[in-house]
């Protein structure tokens, strides 16, 4: 049994992930920003904890996550406000990574997006730039640590039913992927040591998730 913390525990992907992890026998804590989100998280079987990561220091986050075996970053500012995008998707994410190191949480899984990275190609004048740059910087920070990290970069998210099948690997181009498949990829990645130290871009596809992840 693994004790897994999910930052952004009320997000659409997280609410699909939590029951998958519970069913697999893990203990799950969903870290949420607002008390009114607690009921939805509890309904999945996870334990809700109200803590605004955007406003917590590295030391405070380390205290919050101490005792977890793994941490999943599935939070986001939601776009539309550049200042908050920088504050959440870059600054808070980086603090949570550093906090994991301080707290001895060895496994860290970052949910990013397909195309993130130093060569994301989004021009500064584009409204998407703060998100693209923030996620890319957080990903790079994580990859530079000694944590057991995995960076997942799903394509555009859809509400379609999960198929349990994806495509990934060299040459895969951005497409779309169901949130349910993203949740299943996160759950499988936490269970597969072969995903440690890897950045994985993926879409919906034809290959069973565990096979695709190797």
Image: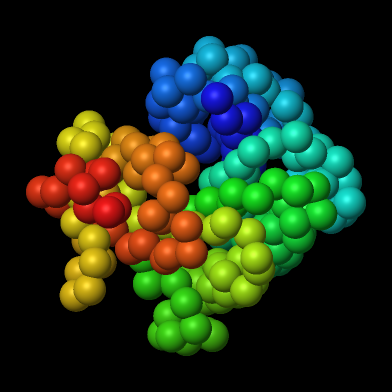
Q: Position of residue 210 (x, y in %)?
A: 26, 44
Left or right side of 54 for 32 = left
Task: Say whether residue 19 is visible.
Answer: no
Which quadrant: the N terminus?
A: top right
Left or right side of 145 for 74 = left
Q: Where, by quadrant of the figure, is residue 30 drawn?
A: top right
In the image, what residue occupies the spot 29% across and 40% down? Answer: 181
The number of numbered discs placed on residues in the rendered structure image is: 0
Towards the viewer: 7 or 70: 70
Left or right side of 187 for 211 = left
Q: Position of residue 10 (x, y in %)?
A: 57, 32
Q: Is residue 77 above or below residue 209?
A: below
Task: Say whether residue 74 is visible.
Answer: yes
In the image, what residue occupies the spot 22% across and 73% down? Answer: 170
Towards the viewer: 81 or 60: 60
Q: Position of residue 139 (x, y in %)?
A: 56, 68
Q: Is residue 12 above or below residue 45?
A: below
């Amino acid at each position: 049994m693994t004790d897994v913390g999910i930052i952004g525990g009320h997000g659409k992907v997280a609410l699909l992930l939590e029951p998958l992890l519970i069913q697999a026998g893990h203990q799950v804590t969903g870290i949420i920003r607002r008390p009114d989100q607690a009921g939805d998280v509890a309904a999945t079987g996870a334990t809700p904890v109200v803590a605004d990561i955007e406003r917590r220091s590295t030391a405070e986050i380390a205290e919050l996550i101490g005792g977890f075996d793994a941490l999943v970053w599935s939070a986001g500012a939601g776009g539309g406000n550049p200042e908050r995008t920088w504050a959440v998707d870059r600054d808070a994410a980086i603090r949570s990574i550093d906090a994991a190191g301080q707290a001895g949480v060895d496994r860290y899984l970052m949910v990013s997006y397909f195309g993130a990275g130093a060569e994301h190609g989004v021009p500064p004048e584009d409204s998407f730039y703060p998100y693209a740059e923030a996620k890319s910087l957080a990903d790079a920070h994580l990859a530079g640590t000694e944590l057991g990290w995995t960076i997942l970069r799903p394509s555009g998210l859809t509400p379609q039913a999960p198929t349990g099948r994806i495509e990934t690997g060299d040459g895969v181009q951005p497409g779309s992927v169901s949130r349910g498949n993203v949740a299943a990829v996160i759950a499988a990645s936490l269970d597969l040591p072969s995903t440690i130290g890897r950045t994985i871009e993926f879409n919906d596809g034809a290959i069973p998730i565990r096979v695709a992840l190797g």
